[in-house]
Image: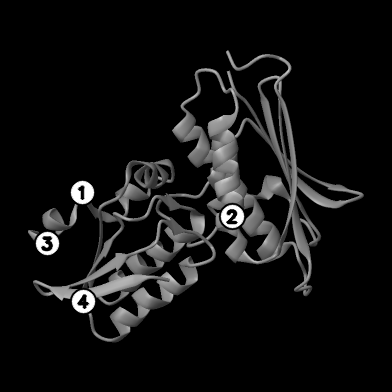
Amino acid sequence: MCGAPETILNLDIQIPNQTRYLRLIGNITELIAKEIDAGDADREALAYNLNLVVTEAVTNAIQYGSPSDDHDRVRIFLSYENCDLCVRVFDHGQGFDLASFGAPQVDELHERGRGLFFIRALMDTVEYRRTECGNVLEMKKRLL
Amino acid sequence: MKVLTEERGGKTILTLKEERLDAHNSGELKDRILKLFEDGCRDVLVDLRNVQFIDSSGLGALLSGHKNAAHRSARFALAGLQPRVRSMFELTRLQRVFEIYSGLQEALSE
């Protein structure tokens, strides 16, 4: 089992929409994964996977979700409560249909399109929707 | 991007001196690999032993190298994948696509 029920962590970060900040946000999420009381979970694997998931989501927000505005920012909200890890990444782009992205075929050597595959493979639930704060990609994982 | 390029035993070895391969530096890696083939290199080996993290754009840059090599009937191989990095190839089943060696010595002896 994961930690005590009162384990609550909320982190709200905004970064410039530049890929040079991917390392920073990735390192922050790795540190969180290593610090939270995640029960029997493989902490090193959890840290890598969380780093990857956030990196992919923020990359998408930078590349597709900040139309012609160099001063736009990407907001990342991360929470951990009662064994439930939730990451939300907001963007201000036109949005996309999550259902239209299938798993990449190994014999189709496309250079793009594996980011959402990684997110889906490593998290329990993934949703993309419009909110008053922009579009949000919400990714959840239960740590038991 | 910090990269060391050297010739050894008829091969061009590209050693990445970065711990992270993501959307910030994968475009530059893709361009560097393409430049090697354009300059006439026909046997390129990418040493990934220093890379501890790779994302989908990093895999995409290496796939670009693989395709460029195939297009030119050249050779493109990878060596020194760290366990977490290798697991990303396995998750996407790309380990079936690339020629992968455990280390540089093994790759050079081929």
SS at circle 4:
loop
SS under mark 2? helix
Q: x and y percent of residue A23 in the render?
A: 55, 56
Q: Position of residue A22 (x, y in %)?
A: 59, 57
Whether residue A116 is visible here, answered yes or no, is no
Which numbered mark, 2 or 4, is in the foreground of this view? 2
Q: Quadrant of the C terminus of chain B?
A: bottom left
Work out whether residue B64 can be spotted. Answer: yes
Q: Which residue is mark 1?
A: B102
Mark 2 in CB contact with mark 4 (< 8 angstroms): no
Q: Is residue B80 left or right of residue B3?
A: left
Question: Does the CB distance between marks 4 and 3 fall below 8 Å?
Answer: no
Provide the secondary structure element on which disc 3 rests.
helix
Q: Chain of mark 4?
A: B
Residue under numbered circle 3: B108
Q: Give the answer, above or below, for where A134 lies relative to B64.
A: above
Compare marks 1 and 3 and give the one earlier in the sequence.
1
Judging depth in this view, the residue of A51 and B55 nearest the camera is: A51
Furthest-bottom residue in view?
A: B39
